[in-house]
Amino acid sequence: MRSGRNGAVRSIAGEARRSTLVLTFVLMFPALISLALMLVAVALFSSSTRHMEQVAALRPMVATDIPEYIWNAVSGRVTYDACGAEEALQRVNGRLDALISETGGQLELVVARRTMDTLAGYAGEIRQGLTGGTPIVEIEQMLDEVRSVAALAENMLSDCITQEAETAGALNRQIVRIAVLFAAVEIALFVFALVFSLRMRRRLERTIREPIARLERVTGLLASGKLEARAEVTDTLELRDLTASVNRMADRIGELIQRNREEQENLKKAELRSLQAQINPHFLYNTLDTILWLAEDENSEEVIRITKALSDFFRISLSSGRDWITVEQEIRHLSGYLAIQKTRYRDVLNYRIQVDEEIYACPILKLLLQPLVENAIYHGIKEHRGGGLIVVEGRRKGDRLFFTVCDTGGGMDAERLSAVRRSLAEGTEMPHGQEFPGHAGSGFGLRNVDQRIRLYYSQAQGLSIDSGPEGTTVSFDVPAERREEE
């Protein structure tokens, strides 16, 4: 495998995150600045408008109300204390002080405030004149001064309103300029974001498409049978694991193919050896000898029975090259074999086949029971003084078929049983000196069946063996629904 082209590890999520952050910053930062400036300008505009409203509310009080309150006192309609001039002066001065503080000492307001102090001074003199007996002519002259000063203060307030209106107009124009400027900036940024997003999309597409295209090429090569093909390590972080998995899969496929070749070779050897074992010349010679002496003894019924059993035995053994037969055919094959052996060994061999008829139609790999029975005859019953009994049982439990071959022969001691089990587990020949009595290489029939069960049924467990002084039991279980085409 080759390393990434530029050595730098890229992440699809990282690329998307970076592009999103850049676009967010590009689009949001100017908008936030524009919003802040707009808010400041609007706040200033609102403040200026409020000042104009407050100043406008003071103008009638200064120009009309206060001189009228003092005139009522001078004309004798009300006393000076009851005319309300002092309260009006205090309200106007209080509002002017607040406006001066808010505006930072606007000149027109300061002048108006000083003018109001002058007005208050004239109002005080009129009050003293009314209480001190000053001639009315002089008081009226002071009243004219009050009216002149009030008019001057009202002019200052009007100038203040004019100034605030100009300020508000300037702020309004500034707001418009800010809006137009930032609208243009936003349009430019939108175009930039569009171009940037297109570039980032193409970059992300390359980040994803190129490594996936390389993986597609490699998987295509693997699919075409070029198992040496491997994907180069990509610099895209999210696809590294996928690339490594594809390479591991290719390695695993190569291993499995090699293992499958070995298993097929072993299976072919096992099948050949199984067929050779079934077409045993000695068995055939002995059977023909038995038929011969039965014929010489003119026992035609036995000749017919043994000949038919031999015919069924070889017919089912060959099965037109098929690997799968029904349980019924397997039992018929086994019955033919036992019938022939029973004729040969007579009272030495007894047998019983107890297979539930409900499983007769189930498919099964052929030649599984006969080698086990043969092993029981030659290494159990034949070697046991007084002969013995072989019992073959078959039943269904759930979705599996269970078969057992039991014999009442001499059995095996613990050491020999352990050696046989180890030989089956490892698929090896029995160690020299550990064979069944009187038969070198006696584990072949068991190993053959065990290996074929494992290979054909793809299961880890083949045969199970238990043995003791009272005999030996060999059992196995296989799926009940295995089909020939599998």
Image (cartoon, grey):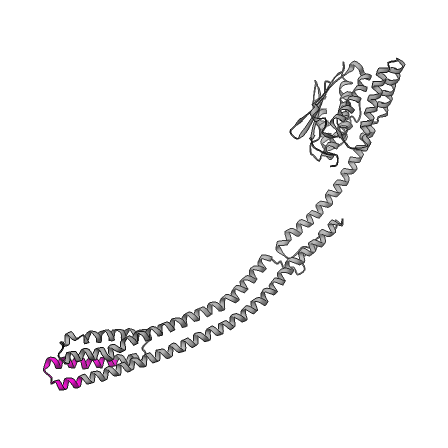
In the image, taking residue 234 as reference, residue 316 lies left or right, namely right
Rendering coords of residue 403 (x, y %): 70, 25
Query: Which image quarter: residue 287?
Result: top right
- The furthest residue to the right: 296
Residue 437 shows in this picture: no
Return the residue nearer the eye: 41 or 114. Answer: 41
Residue 284 shows in this picture: yes
Q: What's the magenta region? A: 114-142
Look at 51% across and 70% down and name the residue there: 186
Rendering coords of residue 140 (x, y %): 16, 85
In the image, taking residue 203 as reference, residue 159 lies left or right, namely left
Rendering coords of residue 182 (x, y %): 49, 72
Query: Above or below — where is 465 with respect to 195?
Result: above
- Quadrant where the C terminus sits is top right
In the image, taking residue 7 as reference, residue 287 lies left or right, namely right
Q: Main secondary structure of the magenta part?
A: helix
Return the residue nearer the eye: 95 or 289. Answer: 95
Residue 173 in magenta stretch = no
Return the residue nearer the eye: 207 or 353. Answer: 353
Residue 117 in magenta stretch = yes
Query: Which image quarter: residue 114?
Result: bottom left
Question: Total label count?
Answer: 0
Look at 16% across and 75% down and name the residue there: 83
Query: Above or below — where is 98 with respect to 317?
Result: below
Rendering coords of residue 102 (x, y %): 32, 73
Query: Above or below — where is 440 with respect to 3?
Result: above
Query: Above or below — where is 478 with respect to 226?
Result: above
Query: Which image quarter: residue 412?
Result: top right
